[in-house]
Image (cartoon, helix red, strand yellow):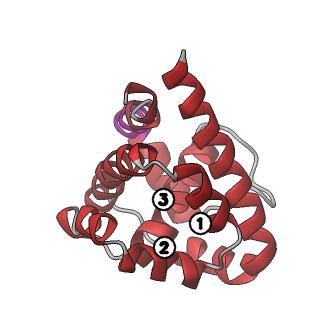
Amino acid sequence: MRRAMRYLIVVVLLAEQAHAQAAKDADERRKAILDYQLTMTRADQLISAMGAMTKYVVSLPDFAERMRRSMQMTTAEQIAQIEKDPKAADILKTNQLTARDYIVGVPALRMALLAASGAPQGPTIIASPANVAFAKANLPVLKPKMDAVDGAGARR
């Protein structure tokens, strides 16, 4: 029960972070997400990094405070924060990603999968037509992987 509660807190904080972040640099972020091109290799790298990053962040004693601070950061500040954290940077390096790839690529992948699953695009779900087509074509492979990663924090 405690693990599930922690996972719920992380999910809520991430949702709040996404909302706050959208208010700060929505146009830049929207363009970056629309310009981000997904491939199967890149999706696998992002999903692998997400699992490791979630486990790492949830394991920190100050994870709630980190999430709160992160909600108030711009995309550039979030990228800088990851680059300054040796463990986070190592997770990305292991998965052959840059901090920018992670900060932009994770929402690009999530939103493309949501759109491919039938969620209407709008202010909260943005995805390029190419990424939606990619997600639709690969939904049977990507959705189970994403579902497994989304449960990673709860298994801590």
User: In x, y percent, where is residue 28?
Assistant: 67, 84
Q: Which mark is residue 36?
A: 2
Membership of 37 in magenta stretch = no
- Residue 145 on the magenta span: yes
Local SS, label 1:
loop
- Kindly identify the amino acid type of the residue bearing the numbered disc 3: Val
Helix, strand or loop at label 2? It is loop
Q: Residue at x 65, y 79 (%)?
A: 74
Q: Do the residues labelled 1 and 3 touch (CB within 8 Å)?
A: no
User: Disc 1 or disc 2, which is closer to the eye?
Assistant: 2
Please state which of residues 150 and 117 is positioned toward the viewer in this rendering.
Answer: 150
**Horizontal and vertical percent position of residue 14:** 63, 51
Mark 3 neighbour class, 10 Å CA radius: few under 14, some 14 to 19, many 20 or more: some
- The residue lying at 55 percent from left, 32 percent from top is 6
> Looking at the rendered structure, which numbered label has been put on residue 106?
3
Of marks 3 and 2, the one in the foreground:
3
Earlier-in-chain disc, 1 versus 2 = 2
The reply to whether dot 1 and dot 2 touch (C-beta < 8 Å) is yes
Q: Position of residue 44 (x, y in %)?
A: 29, 52
Q: Is 31 drawn above or below residue 126 in the view shown?
A: below
Looking at marks 3 and 2 on the same chain, the residue that comes earlier in the sequence is marked by: 2
> Mark 3 or mark 1, which is nearer the start of the sequence?
3
* Of residues 3 and 93, the one drawn nearer to the viewer in this rendering: 3
Q: Is residue 112 left or right of residue 90?
A: right
* Residue range (magenta): 139-146
| Image coords of residue 116 (percent x, y) | 58, 44
- What is the crowding at mark 1: few (fewer than 14 residues within 10 Å), some, or many (at least 20)? many
| Residue 142 left/right relative to 93 | right
Marks 1/2: CA–CA distance = 8 Å
Q: Report crowding for label 2: few under 14, some 14 to 19, many 20 or more residues within 10 A (C-alpha).
A: some
Q: What residue type is disc 2 on?
A: Tyr
In what quadrant of the picture does the N terminus appear? Answer: top right
